[in-house]
Amino acid sequence: MSNFDSPRRSVAFIGSECHPFVKTGGLGDVMYALPRELVNLNCDVRVILPRYECIPAKYQEKMVYRGEFYMDLGHTGRNVYIGIMEYIEDGVVYDFIDNQEFFSGAKPYTNLVDDIPKYCLFGKAALAVLNYLDWIPDIIHCHDWQAGLIPLYLRTTFATTPVARAKSVITIHNLRFQGIYNIPTIKYWSGLPDFLFDGSILKQGQDDANMFKGGLAYADRITTVSNTYAQEIQTAEYGENLDGHLRYHNTKLRGIVNGIDYGMWDPATDKALTVNYDISNVLEKKPEAKIALQQELGLAVDPGKYVIGLISRLTDQKGLDLVNAVIPELMDGNTQIVVLGTGDKVYEDSFRAYETAYPGQFAACIQYDEARAHRIYAGADSLLVPSRFEPCGLTQLNAMHYGTVPIVRETGGLKDTVEPYNQYYLSGNGFTFDRYDAGLLLGAINRSKTFYFEDRYHWDEMVQRNMAKDVSWENSAKQYKDLYLELTQW
Ligand code: ADP
């Protein structure tokens, strides 16, 4: 059956970031890649985003004005300007909501004082834009807390308008961030009816409202980005205080693992790389990519060294306290470590200190640099992802696709995508450990090292197995399409 035999559905994707316009993490990748894949599955997709001032000029210049209107904003008594700027690429329409007062600044997110009003406005404006454009989708697909109020607006403020025909889906990319603020503030900016602020929908604790919680209660379906995370968030350990709420709503919850965009991530054509390769020549080219990386970062140039990469937001979520604890034991003269990331000062400083302590062996790149990230995926032998929790994780997928061996903690999407190496069956993609414990991380890294130095033949087989593994969006996008069809059976 060709993809176009599957019934056509229209979907509005609504979220707060999207590559290449604005990205701080995995959500930006998904908002870029999944709509493209859905277009191939006979979906008509519009992506609705804030027109942040920080979107690079080269995209701003290509946006085309589609209209404007004024919208009342919560209980502020104000009518605010909503402009629509459009940008079309590869069959996907991007509609940017323009309001200079709310979307100014050098970064998409600042602090909750500013972000709560920003996303109260954004959610309402997104639905108003669909009505204004007279483009009523079958499905409204909301992403993370910033779009959390949309399922509520849809069934209250907009209940008697055309857009209410749509079904809503909300995807949890990261439950840690929920958009929690005191009830009067969220009432003031959203204008949502009082009954929603009771205990089972928006209310949290005594005085607060939780935008994500409300969206999860009112959406027709909830998805999250891996099966394991879908189970984990129903437990107290991973539920971020919403485990009870999610258990209550679990009949509408399912996990669909993320993929990566093969157009953006392909070592054979990747323009960021100095050495391109594919599965047929990876074994001879990857050492060249490693040498290029060592030269770029001022490491001792020697393809015989074992190079471990880490590409990550430097926050507690990512297991960096474990990494910090084991570094001195890894620096044995045969191993090099490359860290790329920004975030908490304590980690930035400790990685810089390691660079000073181990010159030529440890590189701390405290920056956000997409091109360098690509060269690390290509040049490293293995990549660390020892997260405390990880809804899906994309870096382990990028790594495998570039012939690099992931070393991960068995949580969330890491557990679902990295099969541990089995020396009897000669199967698996990487090295894993279960409990959140520095000793277990060290053990996993040491197993990988022993394997690399003592059994290169089978290591190389794993490199090729990883490159051959299907980590594309194709299968996952089909699961989203099936979900949309389930919700719209006519
Ligand atoms: P999260 O969304 O929690 O940050 P993911 O693993 O889902 O983690 O996605 C991270 C994405 O951001 C990957 O595409 C990764 O390559 C990229 N990334 C993370 N840190 C950096 C950095 N410092 N420079 C460039 N890219 C980065």
Image (spheres, rainbow, N blue to C red):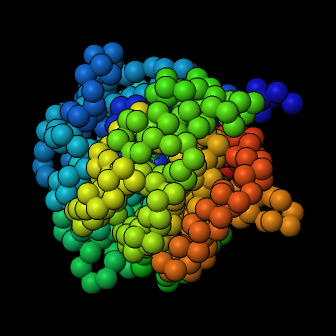
Q: Is residue 419 left or right of residue 443?
A: right
Q: On screen, 331 above or below 150?
A: below
> In the displayed structure, does residue 422 sit left or right of residue 67?
right
Residue at image coords 76%, 26%: 4
> Which residue is at a point 27% across and 27% down the rendered structure image?
56
Q: Is residue 489 left or right of residue 132?
A: right
Left or right of 9 in this view: 211: left
Between 305 and 107, the residue placed more toward the observer is 305
Q: Where is residue 426 in the image (x, y as percent from the top left)?
A: 83, 59
Q: Quadrant of the C terminus?
A: top right
- Determine whether 373 is above or below 326 in the image: above
Residue placed most toward the observer, 242 or 173: 173
Of 59 and 282, nearer the camera is: 282
Decide if residue 80 is in sight here: no
User: Residue 314: horizontal and vertical position, in percent?
Assistant: 34, 59
Q: Quadrant of the N terminus?
A: top right
- Number of callouts: 0
Rendered residue at 32%/22% (across/down): 59
Please indicate, yes or no, whether residue 439 appears anywhere in the rendered image. Answer: yes
Residue 358 picture location, percent across and down: 33, 59
Quadrant of the rendered image containing residue 322: bottom left
Residue 480 position in % (x across, y down): 65, 46
Residue at figure coordinates x 13%, y 44% from the top left: 78
